[in-house]
Amino acid sequence: METVATARAFGGTQGVYRHASAATGTDMTFAVYVPPHEPGARLPVVWWLSGLTCTHANVTDKGEYRRACAELGLILVAPDTSPRGQGVADDPAWDMGQGAGFYVDATQAPWSPHFRMWRYVTDELPALVAAEFPADMGRQSIAGHSMGGHGALTIGLTFPERYKAVSAFAPIVAPGQVPWGEKALGGYLGPDRAAWRRHDAVALIEDGARLPELLVDQGDADPFLAEQLRPWLLRDACEAAGIGLTLRMQPGYDHGYLFISTFMADHLAWHAARLGGAARSP
């Protein structure tokens, strides 16, 4: 693992790191904030998955999470959203290809050689974080925005024993029913819609996946609300399954990071309450 940059913030350390990924076959960059802590302590980990076109830098630069993480004793890890670089397939549009990995392992050409973000986020990067940072991997949670909200929901529903809390901002809740998802899942996974269901939060719930509760914030002035996001589909699925969904429609807020930064501390406090407090001694 190569350290790209570090800086002090709220008594902790914000770092950016790079490593050679076996999952993607490329170098991958990610960000980690480690709050102040006693030597030898192990800290709970919040995974943040970003949305279309983003890198680790979007939340790092605009998410305004560090003060809350420092106060709550939370590590925050922000991966990139896709493999990148020469020889990595791409699409001329911004909603497919580099910057738009959709947190799946692609099975279709030309994507399958590198676009294995599910494996990267759920397996390879957690192992690296566990080895290199003071992380308590028994206390993990996951959150994300838009495409990353989709990733957080599907990963959390797939591994409910691993993630103690799951939340999202403006998530794509049913990619099998909206244009962004139909394009991405069709391109990465092929035309068989049955193969899409394990990467669709609403379909996962319909098929029996369960979590105790979810927190979702959605701006009612989001330009993607009706066509791409449709949080009412998640509300209906959770009601039918008995999942406790807190869906907060936020008046006047749009899809961007000013919206996210406004409610980020709320989400982190919600995660901390379910992760069992701050640092644990060794």
Image (tube, helix red, strand yellow):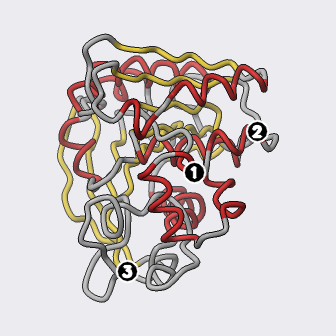
Give percent across and percent down for residue 268.
Answer: 44, 25
85 sits to left or right of 282: left
Of the pair 204 and 282, the residue shown nearer to us: 204
Quadrant of the drawing holding the C terminus: top right
Q: Earlier in the sequence, mark 2 or mark 3?
A: 3
Q: Nearer the viewer, residue 229 or 111?
A: 229
Report how far apart the C-alphas of labels 2 and 3 lie in the structure: 35 Å
Name the amino acid type tagged 1: Gly
Residue 206 tag number: 2
Quarter that holds the N terminus: bottom left
Q: Which comes before the other along the chain, label 1 or label 2?
A: 1
Give the residue type at disc 2.
Answer: Glu
In the current view of this chain or complex, which residue is farthest to the bottom? 87
Measuring from the top left, give residue 275's x and y in whole percent: 60, 28
Estimate the x, y position of residue 226 in percent, counting from the top left. Answer: 40, 31
Residue position marked by numbered label 1 in the rendering: 176
